[in-house]
Amino acid sequence: MFDPALFKLPGMRRLTVILGLLAVVEGICIIIQAQFLSLAIVGLWHLQTLATIVQPMLIFAIAWTGRQLLVVFKNRLMYPIVEKTSGDMRRQVMQKLYRLGPSYVAKTGTGNVVTTALEGIDKVQTYLMLVVIKVIDMMVIPWVILIYIAWLRWREALFLLAIFPLIIVFMIILGYAAQAKADKQYVGYQRMSNHFVDTLRGLPTLKQLGLSKSYATNVYRVSEGYRKQTMAVIKVAMLSTFALDFFTTLSIAVVAVFLGFGLVNGTISLLPALVILVLSPDYFLPLRTFASDYHATLNGKNAFADVQKMLALPVPTHRDQLGTQPLDWQADSDLRLSQVNFSYDGEQPALSQLDLTAKGYQRIGIIGASGSGKSTLINLLGGFLTPEADQGSIKVNGQAVSHLNQTAWQQSFFYIPQNPYLFHATLAENIAFYQPEAGISAIGQAAAKAGLTDWIETLPDGLATQIGEGARGVSGGQAQRIALARAFLDSSRKILLFDEPTAHLDIETEAALKQTILPVFENHLVFFATHRLHWINQMDYVLVLDHGKIVEQGTPAELAAHNGAYVRLRDEMVGAI
Amino acid sequence: MKAFFATFKHDTWVMPYLRKYKKLLALTLFLGLMTFFCGSALMFNSGYLISKAARHPYNILMIYVPIVLTRAFGIGRPAFRYAERITSHNWVLRIVSDFRKKLYQAVAKHAVAIRQNFQTGDVLSILADDIDHIENLYLRTVFPTVIAWMMYLIIVIALGYFSWWFGLLMFLMLGLIVIVMPLWSVLLNGARETQSRKIQQTFYTQLTDAVMGLGDWLISGRQTDFNDRQTAPIDEIASLRRADHRFQWWRDFTIQLLFGVICIALLIWSSFYWTTDKASSNWIAAFVLSVFPLVDAFQSVSQGVSEWPSYQRSIRRVNALDTTPTDETDQTVLTESFSQLQVADLDFQYAEANHQIFKHLNLTLTAGEKLALLGPSGTGKSTLLKLILGDLQPTNGSVQLNDVPISRLQNERATLFGVLDQQPYLFNTSIMNNVRMGNPDATDAEVKAALTSVELAPLIDGLPDGYETIVEEGGARFSGGERQRIALARILLQDAPIIILDEPTVSLDPITEAHLLATVFRVLQDKTILWVTHHLAGINYVDQVRFLEAGQFDMAGTPQELYATAPRFKRLYDLDQGHE
């Protein structure tokens, strides 16, 4: 019920003690309030005048107010810790994310990462706010009240004590039953609940097939099926609330009847009887409020565990083996990989026994069928993926490194994927992303070199136009040009990693873009993964990949000369086979 | 207030459903009312029971009725509550089924058959969420509020029966709790909600930027900037939540204080009204104790009502959907088999744009002809397809099938056109069901034959569940090329004379592309094909090529003619073949 990880939060132990003490005070307030309310009622019952009950009423009012103030006070005491914890957590998640890098995002999914950082932590916040105070209340207040009731009359106290664990046992049993029922139907249930969105998304297809009208009945039918299944689960799930309700209200009824008999027999007088009756709902109240928020706490608990799990993930170390300053890549610099292996999550190798040497301003084309490991190799070269430890070696200018996730290395290259990401910012800010200090004229020149000038002139605010998510749409070709403008703006990065930059473009856009890209190759080390054949003509070295292995490498002319993997691949790509 | 009524002025989503399933709704409200009534009655009765018992009645039978009633109410409350929850969920889920059908029909009306994009997917998810929201509006706001108000009325009338001035006093005091406080909450929350959404939105955008652009952040080495960027929205969100929480604490505190005051008022009233003799003074404890169970019921009204602004947005959005039925007069059928598709002197311009997309465009496609349409993105290839299918109406000129305008053949569409687009949608069901959608009357053998001719049979035979394999969401079980083949099989069953290929290979690698195109043109040999493509792979399969540029065709001819006569075509072709 109480997550041990909660106690590890700073200041939590101390706070628990304080909240526990305040719960005792609250319990005492509840007793005073019950005692004096009963005193006032008994006074009137004895047909006394209003004047005689003024004092008990006042004390009741004070105790009542005090009790409610304590509730607010406890919340206010709790809140700063909750706020700090959730704020810290958001920051930690972001920092962790930065260190885990894009391969983590690729694995987990953008949507999931955003959800964890946004809604997940909101849930954690709600959870912390709810669970700590409620659990402490539940562990303190009932017993304070019970002690007082026992002091008044032990028989009712014993009854109330006995019923408490009974309720919990029933709730747990019924909770499991509901879970079992839900689990059993889970798969079908899940599919039905997603069916509607699935159908909406498929609407254009339904229209193409001429089914869109008749399908409305199907939507209704599936939804009704979903309703029936949901109701079946709800009927069981609600039983646990029913059990709680049933036992608490019935206990109060039983106590009332007990007290009635006691009064008839004269073994108890009205005042203590009334006090016990007033106190019994309050005895159950903390349990009921806890149970009513149980599902919210359950979600929060899972979200809390998810965040903790993410924060505990290992991050790449040894990132400064090449220093922290960008490399000065020269015509005689070199990168050597020998016998390097890589696998996703220790499964079968995605890349194996890589041997490759890149020197100075070489242009290296990487080709292969889809799934042959082109992108994986580019990601490995970019340091987004970490090769198998202790196998093979990677050397940059003779300096051995354990992976390429090196601060210095990463600040020396540009990475241009198929769909470069455009930030939700102005066009100028997007171009200057790698050089935030660049002046507007330099940005303009870079944009001109990238062939963006004509397009910029059509934009309402020119370089100051907002682009990216939810703002002005940018076509695939323009996005590539923006990425190129980044490279034009920052000439200090001498290495370029391209991952299928033109695969999705139409042939004319691609032809035009090629004319812009070619000048960037000058004085750069280029790695160019592609399956568009014409790029190979601009490369002076080619790696042919197949099933994660480099099966051939050499200059295009050499490779074309003998009838190997390269020739076969080319033929297959133009559809000659 | 005005905004509240404006929301319901042309409402077709919330109010009509309150009227539909009236009986179930009445039952739900009755059960909810009984829940709270029993809760209060239990304490009322218990208070009376022990007061009466304390008078030492000479016979136990004197308190027999209250004893029985105490037990009855004790069991009644949980039983009614359970029943209320079941019926309210049942009611709401019934409505959800209606909602879904209605939303589906509204969206279906506007669904355009060509190229679904990511954004529309998003919009649809939002609309689907809106329905869930309205579901919560009933469960969290409408039901608790209406039940609390009914309880409020009963209490005021009951007390007014004993003394009108005390009834009036309670009318005012409880009114503060169930009317004034909720209104105050919703007013304050309405303002905060707008601000909150703005901050949430910024944070969301920032986060998406951070996550999607993580690679760029990492390479740029701007770690400090990255961290700093998150600080502002994190702090804003924190202060927003703080304000929210504070408000809720003090609102609940105020409501509790009001209950304290009501309690004291009851004591004072009792001292005047119920102290005439011993018998009547037994009722004092009953009245005072019955207040406490009401706290729960009445307090939740404020919270429920304060959530209104978020529901309001959803209601407005779904009400903005056009649900009027389409005009189907003037539709006709093609009497003889398809012989010619003609686009004549076509002008087109989007209503809101100032730029004309097509100027005097002409195109004729006779039965069996195969035509490839090329052009840089943004020149209107997709728009032309929409015009040909009748999803858009030309500004001038016409699109005709055998001399019948396409706008009059909309009901016939699926029998005339088959469409294979960039990402054909596969529904999350079996391969068999997906393919059969092309022709619901097809036999299993026909479906299997279609799958065999698109060369999927060996793959499917190798799957453990064979033809009954579930394709998973969006067809995720299969690769891009395989998904296209399943969709192609579906089109084969559909057996329409004209096939539109809308860049079906754009996301495929060249090898898969070459194989797929070979299959496509083999199985669709005798069909009329209009193929929009982004490059020249497979161009030799077609009879005619058209390049769209600035609203007109600037290159037209057979691939062989163009290669020989148009240098631009030759250059692009060579580039595509890797010869340049």
Image (tube, rainbow, N blue to C red):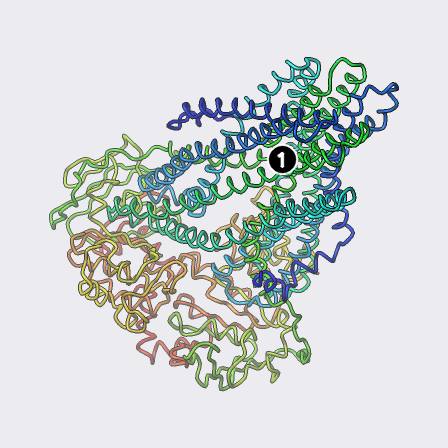
Q: Is residue A183 left or right of residue A482?
A: right
Left or right, B207 with reference to A255 = left
In this view of the protein, which residue sits in the foreground, A477 or B231? B231
Identify the residue at horizontal 74%, vertical 26% (top origin): A45
A534 is higher (above) or lower (below) than B217: below
**Looking at the image, which residue is at 57% across and 58% down?**
A202
Give the residue pinned by disc 1.
A183
Indicate the position of residue A136 as horizontal and vertical percent values.
52, 25
Q: Secondary structure at mark 1?
A: helix
Quarter assignment of residue B154: top right
How crowded pointer 1 is (Cα within 10 Å; few <14, some 14-19, many 20+) is rated as few
Q: Where in the figure is residue B472, as x and y percent of width and height?
A: 56, 48
When asked about the image quadrant of residue A15, the answer is top left
For the point 60% across and 40% down, the residue is B258
Would residue B399 appear left or right of A358 to someone viewing this image? right
Q: Amino acid at mark 1?
A: Asp
